[in-house]
Image: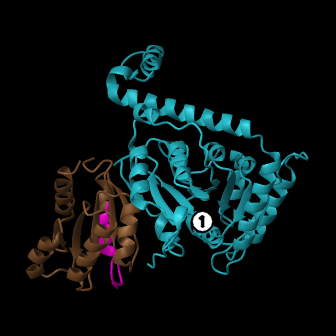
């Protein structure tokens, strides 16, 4: 690795940020509330990548990040992988697919286990993103677990959401069912060198064409991409920039902040309920459901440390 | 879940051609509850130190089959020190002659593992050595 010397705010305090992200990841709800940052002066351009496992999200992200770095932007990647419900452990392997950019001095990659989160994200995801913004990144990429059909959460936390599909995997039908298409700003049919890519493209075009549209709606863009022959990579970066430009004139920033706050609140409450149930063990379950709910609800209020 | 909330980097420094052993250890550690990050093949010690710091791991496991284990351990420890991460434990495994074991420990390895060892014993040794860390 050649660590290029960088001036001023281009330097990444890797040790400091690495440790801060660990503290945030491991924070209980009470601890998270103490250090909570509700909004930030610094904002980065946030792009989320979602899609089924094996669709090529990590590789596509490394190509997108390369473009960001070539623009001279400090770029951070949060890559979430699933936690095993059996062992509680996780194998965090997204980084291996990002070798093409991994040496760049302006890049920071952090692998995060999903732990208790069931929405494709991880514990304290909003806080992790805010912490990275405070370390001065220009671009932040969030890679979801990729379980699909739970994409509303990531949509709330990013500016642009990219859905990555594979040809002929039945994804098109799944996407129609789950309503993911409504959430995605950009849909990439990845591995477009494989057979069936054209057909998938045609199918999804038809679905997109039937969606109701107004003058104020972003029209979801469909891109064919392949890491083998490099097609679509530049188009993806250009389209993300176009979407960002569209947001600057069309997005209701107060509404966005309200939605992010609502997600943050919801995820704190859900985790708090999980913590309480974990502490109570079987005691809370060994009663009728209404009673259990009332007891849980009464215990969810955090300890007052004031 | 003896390694719950522990973060471990499994790294392949040097020019080894395969990583079956490293992957087996990575999976065993995951099954013991750890968050395991794997670097992939042929990484330099300074890259490994950078990943260790970004991922803020509790320990780094080096897998070396090439015979360069002494040099690669030295370099990795030096890079970790440069990265303000001298406190991270480093263990090393692979094809390592018994005679080199003491040298590796003296250089600063927290444990040395060889292919003859049972996986469970390797995991237990890592659990034990991380217990002392907060």
Chain A display color: cyan
Colour mapping used in the image: by chain
Identified at 71% across, 57% down, the residue is A172
B120 sits left or right of A34 in the view: left
Give the extent of the magenta segment.
B12-27
Give the image location of residue A94, x and y in percent: 49, 64
Q: Position of residue B6 (x, y in %)?
A: 31, 52
Asked whether the viewer can see residue A273, the reply is yes
**Residue at 21 percent of width and 51 percent of height:** B133
Q: Which residue does the numbered mark 1 point to in the structure image?
A: A61
Compared with A212, A287 (above or below) is: above
Can residue B24 be found in the magenta stretch?
Answer: yes
Residue at 72% across / 67% down in the picture? Answer: A236
Snapshot quadrant of residue A169: bottom right
Q: Is residue A96 magenta?
A: no
The image position of residue A80, as x and y in percent, is: 50, 54
Image-based side of A30 in relation to B115, left or right: right
Which residue is at the front of the view, A271 or B87?
B87
Q: Which chain is brown?
A: B
């Amino acid at each position: 690795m050649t660590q290029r010397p960088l001036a001023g705010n281009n330097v990444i305090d890797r040790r400091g940020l690495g440790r801060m992200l660990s503290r945030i990841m491991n924070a209980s709800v009470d601890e998270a509330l103490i250090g909570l940052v509700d909004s930030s002066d610094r904002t980065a351009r946030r792009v989320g990548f979602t899609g089924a496992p094996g669709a090529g999200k990590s590789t596509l992200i490394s190509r997108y990040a390369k473009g960001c770095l070539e623009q001279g932007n400090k770029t951070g990647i949060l890559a979430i992988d699933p936690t095993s419900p059996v062992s509680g452990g996780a194998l965090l392997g997204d980084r291996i697919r990002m070798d093409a950019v991994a040496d760049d001095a302006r890049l920071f990659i952090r692998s995060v286990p999903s732990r208790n989160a069931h929405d494709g994200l991880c514990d304290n995801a909003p806080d992790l993103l805010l912490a990275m913004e405070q370390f001065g990144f220009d671009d932040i990429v969030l890679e979801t677990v990729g379980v699909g059909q739970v994409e509303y959460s990531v949509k709330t936390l990013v500016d642009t959401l990219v859905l990555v599909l594979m040809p002929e995997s039945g994804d098109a039908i799944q996407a129609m069912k789950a309503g993911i298409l409504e959430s995605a700003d950009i849909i990439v049919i990845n591995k477009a060198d494989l057979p069936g890519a054209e057909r998938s493209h045609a199918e999804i075009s038809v679905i997109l064409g039937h969606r109701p549209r107004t003058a104020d709606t972003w029209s979801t863009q469909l891109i064919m991409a392949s890491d083998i022959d490099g097609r679509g990579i530049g188009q993806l970066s250009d389209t993300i920039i176009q979407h960002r430009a569209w947001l600057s004139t069309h997005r209701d920033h107060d509404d966005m902040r309200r939605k992010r706050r609502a997600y943050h609140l919801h995820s704190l409450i859900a985790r708090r309920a999980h913590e309480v149930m974990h502490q109570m063990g079987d005691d809370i379950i060994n009663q009728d459901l209404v009673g259990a709910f009332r007891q849980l609800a009464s215990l969810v209020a955090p300890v007052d440390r004031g | 879940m003896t390694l719950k909330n522990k973060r471990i980097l499994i790294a392949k420094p040097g020019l080894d051609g395969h990583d079956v052993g490293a992957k087996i250890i990575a999976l065993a550690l995951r099954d013991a509850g750890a968050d395991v990050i794997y670097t992939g093949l042929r990484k330099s010690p300074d890259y490994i130190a950078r990943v260790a710091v970004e991922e803020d791991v509790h320990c780094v496991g080096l897998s070396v089959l090439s015979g360069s284990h002494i040099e690669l351990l030295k370099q990795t420890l030096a890079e970790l020190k440069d990265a303000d991460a001298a406190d991270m434990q480093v263990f090393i495994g692979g094809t390592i002659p018994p005679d080199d074991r003491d040298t590796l420990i003296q250089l600063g390895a927290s444990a040395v593992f060889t292919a003859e060892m049972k996986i469970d014993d390797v995991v237990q040794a890592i659990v034990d050595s991380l217990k002392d860390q907060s």
